[in-house]
Image (tube, rainbow, N blue to C red):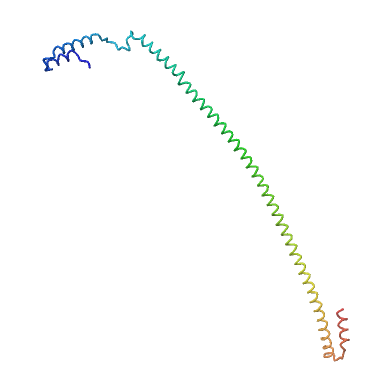
């Protein structure tokens, strides 16, 4: 603590201790001598300390440079090298994965093209099979219709022959009735039948 002379003089009578006047005088004298020995310039700015400051600056810089060169820079270099190696490995792994993805994409495209070709072939085969089945069904239906038409034609022919036979008998009966009733002629059935056949021919 700094004690000025004025403060010491002011506080001396108020101390109230008559047994300490000699001690106070000694303290006052020492403080006065110390205050007289101090310089008015701040020590770091005093020119007489510049050589020692430069020396310690050079020593501190040298120690810092030695520490930086021997400890800090090698660690930083090792960290940067590890990062560089890791980045290179990551890039290589990414390129490898990209190559695998390209191969997988090419395989997928090949499989997709094969699947499309197979589906197209299956569609063509199904269409041809359906067409062949439809043609076979149409041929079967045409055969059935032809058979039914032939049967109907034969039935019609039979009905026609039967109808014509019935018409001849009816014509012979009607002719004989007309000849005997209207004309008053007596004709035999053979004569009437011969006359009807002659007319029909």
Q: Quadrant of the C terminus?
A: bottom right
Above or below, 61 relative to 92: above
Above or below, 21 relative to 132: above
**Quarter residue 155 falls in:** bottom right
**Quarter residue 167 falls in:** bottom right
Q: Please state the horizontal and vertical placement of residue 114, each as a whole percent of the image.
A: 67, 45
- Which sits in the foreground, 13 or 99? 13
Q: Would residue 138 appear left or right of 177 to someone viewing this image?
A: left
Above or below, 133 relative to 148: above
Q: Quadrant of the N terminus?
A: top left
Which residue lies most toward the front here? 19
Q: Please state the horizontal and vertical placement of residue 173, each as a whole percent of the image.
A: 82, 86
Q: Would residue 89 appear left or right of 32 to someone viewing this image?
A: right
Q: Would residue 53 appear left or right of 126 to someone viewing this image?
A: left
- Residue at 71% across / 56% down in the picture? 129
Question: What count of labels does the image hold?
Answer: 0
- Residue at 68% across / 48% down in the picture? 118
Which residue lies most toward the top here? 48
Q: Please state the horizontal and vertical placement of residue 143, each as a whole percent of the image.
A: 76, 65
- Which sits in the foreground, 56 or 103? 56
**Quarter residue 3 falls in:** top left
Q: Please state the horizontal and vertical placement of residue 91, each as a whole percent of the image.
A: 56, 31
- Which sits in the foreground, 90 or 118? 90
């Amino acid at each position: 603590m700094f004690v000025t002379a004025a403060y010491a003089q002011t506080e001396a009578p108020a101390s109230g201790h008559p047994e300490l006047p000699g001690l106070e005088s000694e303290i006052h004298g020492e403080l006065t001598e110390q205050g007289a020995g101090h310089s008015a310039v701040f020590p770091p700015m005093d020119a007489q300390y510049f050589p020692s400051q430069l020396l310690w600056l050079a020593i501190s810089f040298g120690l810092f440079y030695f520490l930086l060169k021997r400890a800090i820079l090698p660690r930083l270099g090792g960290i940067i090298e590890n990062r560089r190696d890791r980045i290179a490995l990551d890039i290589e792994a990414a390129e490898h994965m990209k190559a695998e993805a390209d191969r997988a994409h090419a395989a997928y495209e090949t499989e997709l093209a094969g699947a499309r070709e197979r589906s197209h072939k299956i569609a063509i085969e199904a269409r041809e099979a359906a067409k062949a089945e439809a043609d076979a069904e149409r041929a079967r239906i045409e055969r059935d219709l032809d058979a039914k038409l032939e049967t109907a034609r034969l039935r019609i022919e039979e009905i026609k022959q039967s109808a014509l036979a019935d018409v001849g008998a009816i014509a012979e009966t009607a002719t004989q009735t007309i000849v005997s009733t209207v004309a008053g002629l007596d004709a035999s059935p053979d004569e009437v039948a011969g006359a009807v056949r002659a007319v029909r021919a």
